[in-house]
Image (cartoon, rainbow, N blue to C red):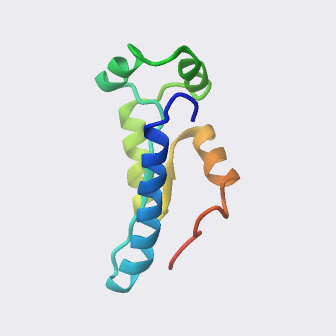
Amino acid sequence: VFGFSAYSPTKFAIVGLAQVLRMELKAHDIYVCVAYPPDTDTPGFVEENKSKPEECRLISETAGLFSAEQVAKDIVRGLQHGQFSIYSGVDGWMLAHLTAGMGPGSSM
């Protein structure tokens, strides 16, 4: 994501770690997932916006702002359904589905 040169590779690394852990831990009935929370209406988001580059602000505005309650419900629902990738909203759904096949779909 433009403007997040520190965030993007670290998230990529976390996803890779989660993929291998999901495969390795399946035999122990332990399941791993990755949540991709959208912009969430929290004090942290307000603070983040104080120094966010204009280009990043314009990109993030297209997906809208989600309540913390909605994001939490989406994460709990994803956990209950055993989803590997957990997301919120239409943009999250599109991103998850447009990148399908770029990682293991399931280790179950």
Image quadrant assignment for residue 48: top left
Report the residue that reaches farthest toward the left: 43
Image quadrant assignment for residue 24: bottom left
Say whether residue 43 is left or right of residue 79.
left
What residue is rendered at 50% in x and 79% in y?
A: 108
Q: On the rendered image, what quadrant is the N terminus found in?
A: top right
The x and y percentages for residue 105 are: 59, 69
Q: Nearer the viewer, residue 48 or 30?
A: 48
What residue is rendered at 42% in x and 47% in y?
A: 10
Report the residue that reaches farthest toward the bottom: 27
The x and y percentages for residue 77 are: 43, 54
What residue is rendered at 32% in x and 84% in y?
A: 28
Q: In the displayed structure, would residue 51 be above or below residue 68? A: above
The x and y percentages for residue 16 are: 47, 62
Report the residue that reaches farthest toward the right: 98
Q: Nearer the viewer, residue 95 or 53?
A: 53
What residue is rendered at 66% in x and 54% in y?
A: 99
The x and y percentages for residue 67 are: 41, 30
Say whether residue 42 is left or right of residue 22.
left
Image quadrant assignment for residue 91: top right
